[in-house]
Image (cartoon, rainbow, N blue to C red):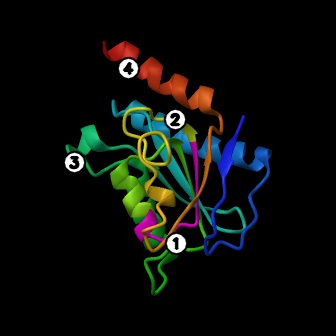
Amino acid sequence: MIYSTCVTTSSTTPLPSQHHLETWMRQALAAAHTAESTDDVPIGAAIFAPDGQLVATGANATRRSQDPTRHAEMVAISIAVETLSSSSWELADCTLVVTLEPCSMCAGAIVLARLPRVVFGAWEPKTGAAGSVLDVLREPRLNHQVEVVGGVLAEECGQLLQTFFSRKR
């Protein structure tokens, strides 16, 4: 089941079908498995152009890099900006897909990158900043709000994290 809340954004791209959202989430899940293979928390992100083409993927790398800012979303945003190599750092026509609800740091970067839409898998009840704990992405006092679609392949995304942490304990 998908939870979706739309707000006015600069996005003119209609919401993709459930099938497309799940296909995109599978790309993010592949990146999460990459993180897991290096003993990082299995969170993955992918950024798609308006035509559905994959622009960038990012795998969580906080443990491997010993850098708390190397979340999957941050990695994907950096790669997307480099890949698109435009004169602007804005990703105003792209969609970010991530296996776990973004934290406040990543939500801030999403707003600053002017991403119009975020699609995530599992909800994060402790640090989620797309509606669970905070709602940075749709905060009306900020200069940019983001369309949020949550719960895409939530069970699969959540199970990946649960399995990872159960092995660690």
Distance, label 2 to label 1, CA atoms, is 24 Å
Name the spot of residue 137 as percent of width and height, x first.
48, 58
Residue 49 in sight here: yes
Foreground tag (3 vs 1): 1
Residue 62 vs 58, above or below: the answer is: above
- The quarter in which the C terminus is drawn is top left
Callout 3 secondary element:
loop
Name the spot of residue 167 as percent of width and height, x first.
37, 14
Sequence-first tag of 4 and 1: 1
- Residue at the location (45% across, 62% down)? 110
Foreground tag (2 vs 1): 2
Which residue is tagged 2?
A: 123
Residue 75 in sight here: no
Report the disc number at residue 73.
Answer: none
Name the side, left or right, on which 70 lies relative to 51: left
User: What residue range appears in magenta?
Assistant: 111-120
Report the disc number at residue 91.
Answer: 1
Name the spot of residue 39 as percent of width and height, x first.
33, 30
Which residue is tagged 3?
A: 67
Callout 4 secondary element:
helix
132 is within the stretch colored magenta = no
Distance, label 4 to label 1, CA atoms, is 33 Å
Which residue is tagged 4?
A: 165
- Residue at the location (75% across, 49% down)? 20
Query: What crowding class fits label 3: few (fewer than 14 Cα within 10 Å), some (14-19), or many (20 or more)?
Result: few
What amino acid is found at the position of numbered circle 4 in the picture? Answer: Phe
What amino acid is found at the position of numbered circle 2 in the picture? Answer: Trp
Foreground tag (3 vs 2): 2
